[in-house]
Amino acid sequence: MFDLLIVLIVALPLVGFAVTALIGRRQDKQAHWIPVGLIVLVWAISMVVAFATLTHAEPFGEAGHGVNLFTWIPAGDFQVHAAFYVDALTACLLIVVTTIGMLVHIYSIGYMSHDPGYWRFFAYLNLFMFSMLLLVMADSFLVLFVAWELVGLSSYLLIGFWKHKRTAALAAKKAFIVNRVGDVGFALGIMLIFASLHTLDIHGADGVLARIGTLDHGTILAISLLIFAGAMGKSAQFPLHVWLPDAMEGPTPVSALIHAATMVNAGVYLVARTSPIFAEAQEALVVVAAIGIFTAILAASIAMTQTDIKRVLAYSTLSQLGYMFAALGVGAFTAAIFHLMAHGFFKGLLFLGSGSVIHSVHEEQDMRRMGGLARKIPITYATMLVGSLAIAGIPPLAGFFSKDEILGEAFKLGFPWVWAIGVIVALMTAFYMFRLMGLTFWGESRVDPHVEPNIHESPPVMTWPLILLAIPSALVGLVLGLPFGAGLLSSWLEPIFTPSTEALHHAESGFQLFGIDGALIVVSVAVAAIGIAVAWRLFGAEIGRIRFRPRPATVTAISGRAPFLYRASLNKWWFDELNHLLFIVIGGRIAAFLWWFDRRVIDDTVNDLAKATVGAGRGLRRVQTGRVQNYALGIAVGLLVMAGSFLILAGRA
Amino acid sequence: MAIGTTIPFTTIPWDDALFVVFAGTMLLAAILVVTMKDIIRCGLAMMVCFGALAGIYVIIGAPLVAAAEVLVYIGAISVLVLFAIMLTQTKDAPASLVFQTQAIPAALAAVLLAVVTILAIIATDWGALAERVATNTTELAKKLFSEWVLPFEIVGVLLLAAVVGGVFLAKRERGRDGEREGGQFR
Amino acid sequence: MIRIFVGAFLAAVFVGGLGIIALAAGGSRSLDAYLVLASLLFAIGMFGFLARRNAISMLMSIELMLNAVNLSIVAFGGFVKGLGASGSVIALMVMAVAAAEATVGLAIIIAIYRNKKTPLVDEYDAMSQ
């Protein structure tokens, strides 16, 4: 029975996509019933399956359960099975993906109601859900790669949804191409895996994870770095991070679903799933941690000066993803997955909330033209406040538990530099989130006077998902993280990550609330509080009794004191310009040279060969005179040669 | 009275001297045939060449062949050639070139051929008789009509065919509608 | 210019040939002399065939070549033991065939002359299409 349910999880969104693509145009405004209905059904099935998995019911047991549908490629030595595998890690991802997916689908009914491409949107959303679910449940690297590419395709389709908008089309192209760069690395990694182990199955006694230890260190290091390259592309780590901010050109539900809660987590999931491979090559893990934490601080620094509300959230996502990779890199796999789940909920909440804000001020996205919206859109305001507190890491909300676990593990497992940078990033995170809140919701209204009278709360179909997301943002930390060090999530995921942590020789030290762990908790909370306080002082706050006035003059003064840093942050550290210079300008010159080379050298060589042939033919044509005497001379000469050589040879013999 | 074997007052035998005379005449005439500008003169030189050749046949000891040479070649073929020259004369014949452009390679090839053949001849041991053997005409006649009768008959048929063919080929086209001299393919 | 060149060559052939004949052991009583003579005549005839422009000159050169062959056959008939009178018979056959061939060749040349209005073989290049 569970086999059928597992297959249904993947099959139903695919059916939804096909049906909506075929008949959606006729359905027009009713096009949402089938896709949304199917996704709700998928959510229900996923919850059943996840529950069964996490309680170790039959047939999942301790290690999870595999479903082999059919042998996709039976080619002698190269066997690829279309197989799914569901264990506790998959269950955690299923919970996040299907919950947020369902809420985004419902939210989109309201958000996209005025859009002429309504049916197309739901078709693409269902395609994306299919791809993502296939990705988290795949049991073969090739199936995973196919799902990987499909997710990239769905992202392209959805980012460029408003295809007549030039910036959207360019952003979609950029996302796809930068993804591709990472995918090349991933593909090479898969090929290397096959070349070394002659199998692409992940689990199973003959699978990659079981036999990875048999390879030599260099090969394992290469495989893990190549797989991480793929994760870098999909999860937008430095230097492949440039596509994520531009991806905000897509509709806000797309940003919420794909670029906050699900697709960008695919990279984190991949590294977590292949953690035994990484555990065998510890240099790769150091690389992962370094790139992760560097991305975190880079993105946080940019987020502090951005004026587009969605861009701030996009850079915030980059930063939190950096945290997750840093966690994976130091070996705290459970902490990374914890942060993945918590981040999915509160970032999804923040994005949907920002969508609600944008909707209420009639598609204005610049925060400098917002302000004082707290009284006018109370539900959105309240839920976004919850989300901001969560991401800033204030206990007892979700972000505190997950972020603190990451920082604590980083410090205890011997990576103090990761911890230090992480603390700075936490400070910056709290600061820019409450800067966002201050500019958007508090203070005086800077909204365009024509729009101001029409500001109203969003319809229930949009606000209910916000409320429903605020609940786990607040509580999931308590549910999964307590008691410290031995929480529910740990009990689920320890069995999966034990082989990896053992390979890394991590000592299992108990949690000491009044020892090192307590001290680290105090540092995290203090840092978050400082960040919030600074933001309140500069940008204002109106929470209950707390009243601060915004001080724009002070802001300008402070940013005036560090002009280079301010400009660098505002210009995203000029990475887009660097890419442009490297690839468009220099690459363009190289391409032009190669084109010249191809034309002049290669084509001309072939042409000259042809001309030589034609010339030879023309020359030889003169032999055919049509006159008998010329032919007779030829005969005479031939006769002489033959007779002469015969005589010479006979004479010699 | 019998002529002595050698020319009087010298030790050169008659046949050697005659041989050299006839051979020289023949070669000279042949060279004139292939190098003279005026074709009619070439034809006449050809007649001289054949005549000398007949003399050489006599020296070898085949008088019937010599007679046939004179009759057939000088009497029939050369006359035929002269007739054909007459029929195909063009006005500008004396003024045009005699030789083709490929005359030089042709000359080289001819010389080379001669050298190769002569070397082969000199190098071969023919195992021949020391003395020439003159052909007995009676014996020749007997051979002709016993051993060689089939080729004889076939040659007869061949000659008939050649004559018929020659007449047919050289016939003037008769136009169906009135006089149309020459061919239709101008 | 060509004629001087060609003439010089042929003169060399002529003198050299006669010399060889004279030097050949036995003079006119040796087989070699007649065969050398025949090959010289053949070479002259071949040169004429390849180098002349008039079609009838070519035919006359062909006759020279045939006669050269005839001479060698008769020479063998006179000197080789087994041949005897057969040599003369064969020579007669060759002569007959040569006559037939000359007949037909001249007829063809006359027919072509009627079409092309010239006896020069430069014009007979219809095979080159």
Image (cartoon, rainbow, N blue to C red):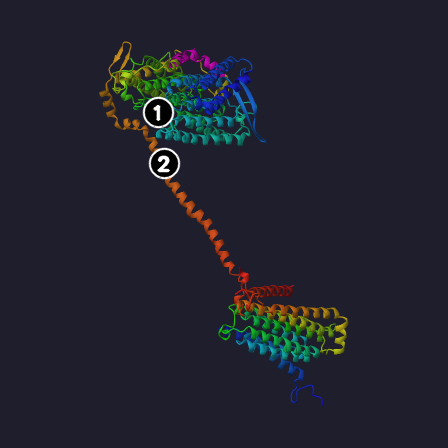
Residue A493 covered by magenta stretch: yes
Q: Is residue A30 above or below residue A233?
A: above
Residue at image mark 1: A299
Dot 1 alpha-carbon crowd within 10 angstroms: few under 14, some 14 to 19, many 20 or more: many
Residue type at mark 1 is Ala
Residue type at mark 2 is Leu
Q: Chain of mark 1?
A: A
| Position in image of residue A412 (x %, y %) | 41, 18
Question: On the picture, is B169 further left or further right than A481?
Answer: right
Residue B112 visible in the shown view: no
Residue A15 visible in the shown view: yes
**Residue at mark 1 to residue at mark 2: CA–CA distance:** 21 Å
Magenta stretch: give its range: A466-494
Question: On the picture, is A623 further left or further right than A325?
Answer: right
| Position in image of residue A368 (x %, y %) | 27, 22
Residue at image mark 2: A582
Marks 1 and 2 in Cβ contact (< 8 Å): no
Residue A431's label in the rendered image is none
Q: Secondary structure at mark 2?
A: helix
Q: Is residue C69 above or below residue A505?
A: below
Residue C18 covered by magenta stretch: no
